[in-house]
Amino acid sequence: MKIEFKKVPNTQKEFELNLDSVKFLGTFSKISQRLAKIDGNISGEIVVDCYKCGKEFPIALNEKQLYLLSDGPFDSENIREDELVIEIDDHMIDFDELLVSELESIKIDYHVCDECDEDTFVDVEY
C-alpha cells in the first residue's frame, strides 16, 4: 500500500497489511506539514535462523511500532531520543516497504533455537 505524502489525512486513518503469516495494522496521520506518524503493531510468525547452529525455526511476533515520517530532509533538533524518523525522498509512503524492512531487521537479530538454548556448552569470547 502506498500513499502520497500530501494525501495523508490530519485525522487518524486505520490501515492493515498482510504478508504471508504476518499482519501489520494500526493508524497513520499527518502531525505537521512535513511529518506523518504511523502507530502500529506487527503480529504473526516468521522463520529465523539460529545464530549458533544455523537451523531455521519460527518465532512469534507482537511488536509495537511507532514511526515518524518526514517528507524530505528532517531537522533533528526537536526529536526525542526514542523516536525513529524516516526521511521519504519520493513523497510516497510505502507501507509494504516499511513492513518488509522491519521484518528483515528482526530476522538478522541474534535468535537461538530451543535445542541450542538448552545446550549447556558456554561460548567463550577471547
Image (cartoon, rainbow, N blue to C red):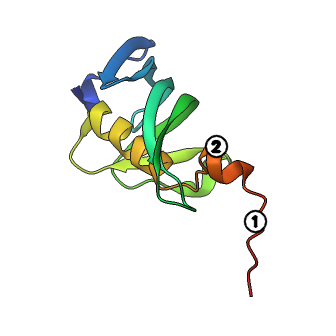
Which image quadrant for residue 19?
top left
Binning the other alpha carbons within 10 Å of mark 2 as few (below 14), some (14 to 19) or many (20 upward) gives: few
**Residue 86 percent across, percent down from the top left:** 42, 48
* Residue to which mark 1 is pinned: 121
Q: Is residue 118 above or below residue 5?
A: below
- Quarter of the picture containing the N terminus is top left
Q: Residue at x 74, y 88 (%)?
A: 126
**Residue 3 percent across, percent down from the top left:** 23, 27
Label of residue 77 in the image: none
Relative placement, left or right, of 24 versus 113 is left
Sequence-first tag of 1 and 2: 2
Relative placement, left or right, of 73 versus 51 is left
Secondary structure, mark 2, is helix
Residue type, numbered disc 2:
Asp
Residues under labels 1 and 2: Cα distance?
14 Å
**Residue 11 percent across, percent down from the top left:** 44, 12
Q: Nearer the viewer, residue 46 or 96?
A: 46
Relative placement, left or right, of 22 versus 64 is left
Q: Is residue 58 above or below residue 77?
A: above
Q: Residue at x 73, y 49 (%)?
A: 118
